[in-house]
Amino acid sequence: MQPSGPRCIVHVPRRFIAEEWGGTETVILEIARRQQRAGLEPRILTSMALARQRTEEIGGIPVERFPYFYPFFGLTAADRAAMDKKGGNLVSFSLLHRLLRLSDVRLFHAHALKRLGGEIRTAARLRRKPYVVSLHGGVFDVPPAELASMAEPIAGRFEWGRFLGALFGSRRLLDEADHVICVGQSELEKARQALPHDRVSYLPNGVDTARFAQADGAGFRARHGLAPDAFVVLNAGRIAAQKNQHLLVEAFARVLAERPGSVLLLMGPETDPDYGARVRAAAEPLGGAVRLLGSVRNDDPDLVAAFHAADLFALPSRHEPFGIVVLEAWSAGLPVVVSSVGGLRALVRQDETGLFFDPEGESAAERLAERILFAAARPELRRRLGAAGLAEARAQYDWDRIHDRLEGIYARAEAHAASRGRPS
């Protein structure tokens, strides 16, 4: 049965391109696909950040991109590129104009904050439509060091666009949202303390378990020159300080001392060039034992094949609101070693669906190496953890289940909007 009334769900992330794919992009695309199957009309509206095409379809979902700018004096081309990658506070008047004119809108779903989030709030207010906000990267549960890293490109630059944030009501975005979605339990707890309302829900990320269930792992090893009997550790995600790959490389040097011939695969785009250079410098003395595979498109078969080629997945993040790559590893039956931080503490159960290590302190690399070596020496443990993770992914995190829960959140958001005189 086709839904009655307006059917267009407008998803607005800060950027959305296949070449710089991450967890947020996966969530938006998979949810949009389920909405499309349910008879809705999802659209993705975003900026031209890192993109070349104004319009395209990704996974069958229409994507529209718009010119943008950063309201700072003195930005260099390198500064702008860094802000594109790190999460710069951009403005797009043409995107706002499109939000105001798009027809048949049921609801706006903001996947961005700051000024762009304010534009979404403004459009929803003027059009008397409900809006929800997803906190993908964390807002209330972000370490100070990460916040400082995000601000590096604008350090010492004069920001002339503060009045735009005030004009769009950016600081009221979460306070006035018809619903706020947290992907991690830790974020949920802190959001409930910080916000002046109770319109906050936990909605975890999901995974396409069928897609990750099978792939040619042996073929991946052959294409990348990996010995069939090599112990392979995989890390997938953007190369950035938050993801902490430098610590993983440091730990892997210790692993090689005890297990020569092991290989570490780092798969993902470099969103912080300086940090990427640090990781490459640390990996260089280890030769071919550490492979930086770069960014892999979401539709590239090698993305799934890499999980099936590996023996262990490692996620040493300093901060992680959820950890969607853990679900992907589980869906491939791959055991995981993860940091005991943020949303990972609620996602993984020690000795049941994975192994934890503490990423803080001087001995963090040693602790991580110990966990990797512990798993490497115990094939039966790896099989048990991988099987338990697969069962968890199938039972709790299938995208159809997540979509049904999101529809419930949308319904509550629409009811709240109607109660305030903003019928959908």
Image: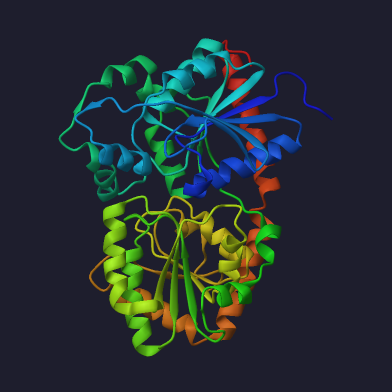
Q: Is residue 247 above or below residue 193?
A: below
Image position, residue 32 (x, y; %): 64, 38
Q: Position of residue 300 (x, y in %)?
A: 59, 57
Q: Please, which residue is most extreme toward the right here?
A: 1
Q: Is residue 306 left or right of residue 51?
A: right
Of residues 265 and 193, which is closer to you in this image? 265
In the image shown, does 81 or 331 lie closer to the viewer?
Answer: 81
Q: Nearer the viewer, residue 172 or 238?
A: 238
- Colour mapping: rainbow
In the picture provided, is 224 more to the left or to the right than 165? right
Relative height, residue 2 to residue 163 (above, below): below
| Image quadrant in which the C terminus is located | top right
Question: Where, by quadrant of the figure, is residue 208 drawn?
Answer: bottom right
- Residue 256 visible from this viewpoint: yes
Residue at the extreme left: 156
Whether residue 184 is visible: no
Answer above or below: position of 113 versus 170. Answer: below
**Which residue does the image show at 35% across and 14% down from the upper left?**
167
Where is residue 250 shown, x and y percent of the image? 30, 73
Q: How many marks?
A: 0
Q: Quick check: 134 above or below 99?
A: below
Quadrant where the N terminus lies? top right
Residue 163: quadrant of the picture: top left
- Residue 411 drawn at (x, y percent): 65, 28
